[in-house]
Amino acid sequence: MSNKTLKPNIFANVASVRFTICLISIFQLVSLAHGQHSILQGERENTDSPLNWELPTLGGQHFWSDVHYWGGWRIQRHSETEHHRLLDPNQIRKAWGSREQCQQTLKGLIQQENIQPEQGTVVILLHGLWRSNDSMEPLGNYLNKQASFTVINLAYASARGKIETHADDLASVIAGLSDQVTEINVVAHSMGNIVFRCYLGQLHRQGLALDPRFKRMVMLAPPNQGSRVARTLSKSLAFQTLAGLGGVQLGAGWPALQPKLATPTFEFGIIAGSADGDKNPSLLKPRDFTVFVNETHLAGATGFHLGPYFHWNIKYHPQAMDETLHFLKTGKFQKPANFISNPPHVRQQ
């Protein structure tokens, strides 16, 4: 291949990286502003204070991680201050302080208001890096409407801590699910898949058995082989600052993180994005403009679907949502693409 052929691709990649850094910077600056505003306006009150007013949350979504979920109520931990808050289904803060204090308040409310836990078949949603659980809401609404799944749309401070920490919080939520839940499914986007795989790895290292209620999982644009884009951006101080430890772990920190990840032992399918759909399933081009197609592959998957998705819209693209629902119900995709059981070596850059 001539240099003339390569130059346009090189320039396009450089421009794409620069554009991505710009978007990341703007997004995170806004998030940081909201987060600091929430702290200044009362999210960091003295936990010993008798004043525990019921107030709407004041932003800062990217600083909070769910550690417990019950009937739409959630207890969250702040990534910087480590204190907790209790939110009702309308995102009204009912208590703050230590986790024990929030847990005790929730226990009393459960008894007083007869708050029922999730029951039957649930789907846990996990968003990706730099996003909040709001980004998964369209998919959650679709799954609930089309199949009456009970959706648990979790939040975690994706850019404010290590993936291992997010996996610990996820483990706490799963451990707190009611016995009335009979089946657990998972749909994760981008880094959310790595958080879940880290959770599985932690169970294995601790000698703990996986909850037998897990049935199926759909991985949306998962960087299962690490991320070449993240490796490139990891060299930037801006990325290191704004993406946090978790973002760097997907790139430069991947060699240390990968051994900590495990593969689901239950059925899981992968949905990847390609501008050409399934007509040209290239393994070397970043078709969704963030994750390369070959980086999504993971041995053991029972289904693979390639569609005309970008990384940011795959979670609410109508076709991707339809394929997600179909896999959760049947364990198969309606339009499967060629699947590579043993993913090729991901070229390092």
Image (spheres, rainbow, N blue to C red):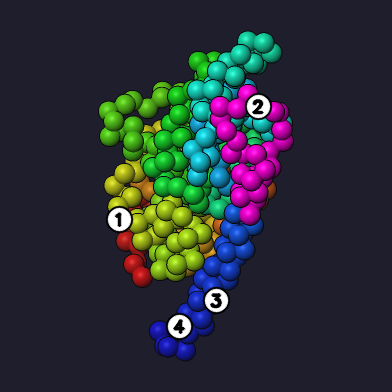
Question: Circle 4 is placed at which residue position?
Answer: 6
Place residue 248 in its image quadrant: bottom left
Residue in the image at 45% along x and 83% along y: 6
* Mark 3–mark 1 distance (CA, rounded to whole Å): 27 Å
* Mark 3–mark 2 distance (CA, rounded to whole Å): 49 Å
Measured from the top left, where is residue 162 in percent x and y? 41, 47
Tell me the SS state at disc 2: loop
Q: Disc 2 or disc 4, which is closer to the eye? A: 2
Measured from the top left, where is residue 334 in percent x and y? 57, 44
Residue in the image at 28% along x and 34% along y: 205
Residue 93: in magenta span = no
User: Identity of the amino acid at label 3?
Assistant: Ala
Residue in the image at 67% along x and 31% along y: 93
Measured from the top left, where is residue 53 in percent x and y? 69, 28
Tell me the SS state at disc 3: helix
Question: Tag 2: Cα neighbours inside 10 Å, few (<14), some, or many (≥20)?
Answer: some
Q: Earlier in the sequence, mark 2 or mark 4?
A: 4
Question: Tag 3: Cα neighbours inside 10 Å, few (<14), some, or many (≥20)?
Answer: few
Measured from the top left, where is residue 290 in percent x and y? 51, 62
Residue 52's disc number: 2
Place residue 325 in its image quadrant: top right
User: Identity of the amino acid at label 2?
Assistant: Asn
Q: Disc 3 or disc 2, which is closer to the eye? A: 2
Residue in the image at 44% along x and 69% along y: 236
Question: Circle 1 is placed at which residue position?
Answer: 255
Residue 234's disc number: none
Q: Which residues are magenta?
A: 33-59
Q: Disc 2 or disc 1, which is closer to the eye? A: 2
Question: Looking at the image, which is closer to me, 44 or 79?
Answer: 44
User: Can you see residue 156?
Assistant: no
